[in-house]
Image (spheres, rainbow, N blue to C red):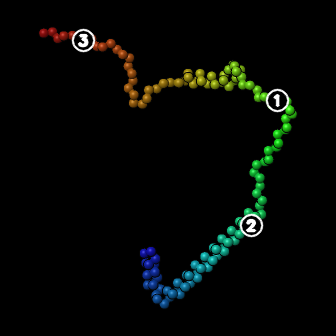
Amino acid sequence: MTEVIIILALALLLLGPDQLPSLARSLGKGLRELRKATDDIKGQFESEIARIDLDQQPQKMIAPVPDAPKAEEGAKPAELPAAPTNPADDPGAARAAARRAAAESQLKLVAPEGAVPRQPESPPPAPAPEPKA
């Protein structure tokens, strides 16, 4: 708000009291024409969007599912092949076992950072010899 007051005071000093009302009038006309043009463009845009929405029919996004063939009475449903029960028959199990063995051979245990290495227990030190007097 203070910036507007400063600008108006400078305009009054520079233009004088005679030219200030005419300048304000022309500035108001310009702003009114600008607002009218933006409202007109906005109205045209909204009417075009509404016209496009009405012209387009909603399209079905999902294709219809065909009806399942009717089963004859007494017919058995198709059975899925059973999973192999022997791991040797399953190539995925053999591959997984090979990967696991390779990973275990490359595995290296490392102590956490800042940990003191553990030393094997040693027998207690022998007592010191007594001093000779």
- Other-residue count near label 3 (Cα within 10 Å), few / some / many at <14 / 14–19 / ≥20: few
Q: Amino acid at mark 1?
A: Lys
Mark sitting on residue 51: 2
Alpha carbon distance from label 3 to label 1: 90 Å
- Other-residue count near label 1 (Cα within 10 Å), few / some / many at <14 / 14–19 / ≥20: few
Alpha carbon distance from label 2 to label 1: 56 Å
Q: Residue at x 46, y 87 (%)?
A: 16
Q: Residue at x 72, y 25 (%)?
A: 83
Q: Residue at x 34, y 14 (%)?
A: 122
Q: Give the position of the C terminus as an image quadrant.
A: top left
- Other-residue count near label 2 (Cα within 10 Å), few / some / many at <14 / 14–19 / ≥20: few
**Nearest-to-viewer mark from 2 and 3:** 2
Q: Which residue is mark 1?
A: 76
Q: Which residue is mark 3?
A: 127
**Nearest-to-viewer mark from 3 and 1:** 1
Q: Nearer the viewer, residue 123 or 55?
A: 55
| Residue 5 quadrant | bottom left
Q: Give the position of the N terminus as an image quadrant.
A: bottom left
Q: Amino acid at mark 2?
A: Arg
Q: Is residue 130 above or below residue 56?
A: above
Precedes in sequence: disc 3 or disc 1: 1
Alpha carbon distance from label 2 to label 3: 105 Å
Precedes in sequence: disc 2 or disc 1: 2
